[in-house]
Amino acid sequence: MPTACVIGAGAAGLTVAHALAARGWKVVIVEGGSRTPAPELEDTYRVTVAGTPHRGVHEGRFRAWGGSTTRWGGQLWAWEPHELAARPEIGIDGWPIGYDEVAPWYRRAFALLGIPDAPLSTAGAHARGVAPAGLDPSLVSIKYSAWLPWRLRNLGGTLGKSLRVAPDVTSHESTTAIGFELRSSEGRVAGVRVRRADGSSMVLSADVVVMAAGTLENVRLLLASNAGGQPIGDHAGWLGRCFMDHLSVRVARFRPRDADDFGRR
């Protein structure tokens, strides 16, 4: 039975772990947080940002079983063909994969998350009673999102719950990946060095290692792992450089009248 070590129990990690377990793999999940995030530990995850302010390192980075979905609103925004295509008029070469390669997976992703239909088209939205936006369609293109019900948006309680009872899935919580063990003769990853909350450490061996801890944590782990005198994957010297944060503007604070009822929806 092949073994996979999945680093990170957020949206990507839980989805990959679920798929591998369904195919008969033995899966080991490493998660830096736990099922019940402890507020007193928040400061231990903070870092000092030098230079340009970067809010995302604190506001978009969560160590918890479920990862960022524990704070996520549940919005699902499928890409469209033009977003992956080349646009030479603005200097964009396009993605190395095309929309046709991505599109078949959208329906599977929505089904896995419990949404039967893909995001609505403009015509579909109007058919369901959504009032047309008062914008010139020749100038502005409207795109509608799909949203998970609030009770389903935390994948730690959906996919994560099923993984906890799967016979060939093991999870290590409050455990941080700190580096890779390499097969010197092949230059391949043979295992993951991890450290528990009590300070003890161990190596988890696996046939395949999946890095699903988010951009910042994945880069940290690669920079901390040395292969041939340089960090893994840093052959061109660009690892960890030119990262762009999400655009973020606070416009309001939402407080439901009945928090319990809202959580059940």
Image: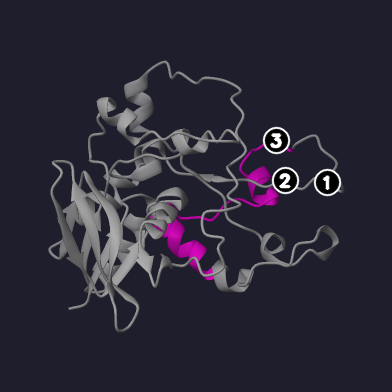
Instruction: Categorize mark 3 by other alpha carbons within 10 Å: few (<14), some (14-19), many (20+).
Output: few
Q: Residue at x 21, y 43 (%)?
A: 174
Part of the protein shown in magenta: 104-132
Residue 197 lies left or right of residue 246; in this view the side is left
* In the foreground, 10 or 125: 10
Give the quadrant of residue 245. Answer: top right
| Residue labelled with disc 3 | 131
> Which quarter shows the N terminus?
bottom left
Residue type at mark 2: give it: Ile
Q: Secondary structure at mark 2?
A: loop
Looking at the image, which residue is at 45% across and 49% down? 216
Kindly state the secondary structure of the residue where label 3 is placed. Answer: loop
The residue lying at 52 percent from left, 19 percent from top is: 253
Residue type at tag 3: Ala
Q: Tell me the distance, in whole angstroms, between the alpha carbons under discs 2 and 1.
A: 8 Å
Find residue 142 and name its label.
2
